[in-house]
Image (cartoon, rainbow, N blue to C red):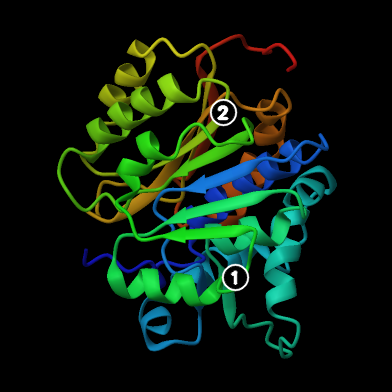
Amino acid sequence: MNYRHIYHAGNFADVLKHAVLARLIVYMAQKDKAFRVLDTHAGIGLYDLSSEEAQKTGEWQDGIGRILDADIPAKAKALLEPYLTAVRDLNPNRGPDGRLTLYPGSPKLTRMLMRPQDRLSAMELHPDDYETLHRLFDGDFQSRITQLDGWLALGAHLPPKEKRGIVLVDPPFELAGEFERLADGLAKAWRRFSGGTFCLWYPLKQGAPIAAFHEALKALEIPKMLCAELSVRSDRDTTGLSGSGLIIVNPPYTLKDELDALLPFLKDRLKQDRHASARAFWLRGEEVPERD
């Protein structure tokens, strides 16, 4: 309950997460049929980068601050454009120094990319953050904001009535056992909504049980699971976040190739030391999955 994403908004982990989320939404929108995005740990939705909290850490400067006005290779630029356009649209009056004022959390980014027929369900447990999120979407009939433990949403809110959707699970990882909880949550959710696309975020840092987590996911025997990881520095001399990963269940057939184009650029642009690395690989599934 003490976690506040404002200290980390727009950092390198957000860049990876939101770039991939945007790709998933763009892919879903290729079909006319409506879809729903379920965001289980939504936060406040929109972050003021000029606030005291954001200025205290300045993490966005080594994340979106390095990306927004960068010289980006053509293919990576096209893939990042939906995400970067949303950030620019929130900051139309940037000064000569290019500094950002606002950064979209996942619910706001989702809402900016949705079509009129699509829907957002956003869950937030923290009472103050829920109130802020609720005010942000007040009067928006396409969005439903609920004060709820996001883990419960994986049972109670699936499957969506649209029968198409993306489930973003982005817990704060403050408590012990969160990797196990994430694997268990996916198992429950996939049984209820096996056709959905799931995007699970996890931290990379010293001592994190990544290998065991991946093995637990493989044991679920879900047919298609793609993994993307980006580390910006060595974890040897820090107890903090050195990188982050995403598990994408039922990924778009295009996503592996897109990650292969995006990740090298993100690694080179966001690296903080020579130990930076990035990879995309299949935990389960064909190297070239069948088209839906």
Q: Closer to the camera, 273 or 47?
A: 47
Specify the quadrant of the image occupied by residue 124: bottom left
Q: Closer to the camera, 32 or 110?
A: 32
Image mark for residue 134: none
Task: Using the image, determine if residue 228 lies above or below residue 89.
Answer: above
Horizontal and vertical percent position of residue 60: 50, 70
Name the residue: 41% across, 10% down: 221
| Residue named by callout 2 | 196
**Circle 1 sits in a helix, a strand or a loop, which is it?**
helix
In the rendered structure, which amino acid carries the disc numbered 2? Gly
How many numbered marks are there? Answer: 2
Q: In the picture, which quadrant includes the C terminus?
A: top right
Left/right of residue 121 with respect to residue 119 in the rendered view:
left
| Residue named by callout 1 | 65
Left/right of residue 146 with respect to residue 284 in the rendered view:
left
Name the residue: 55% across, 74% down: 138
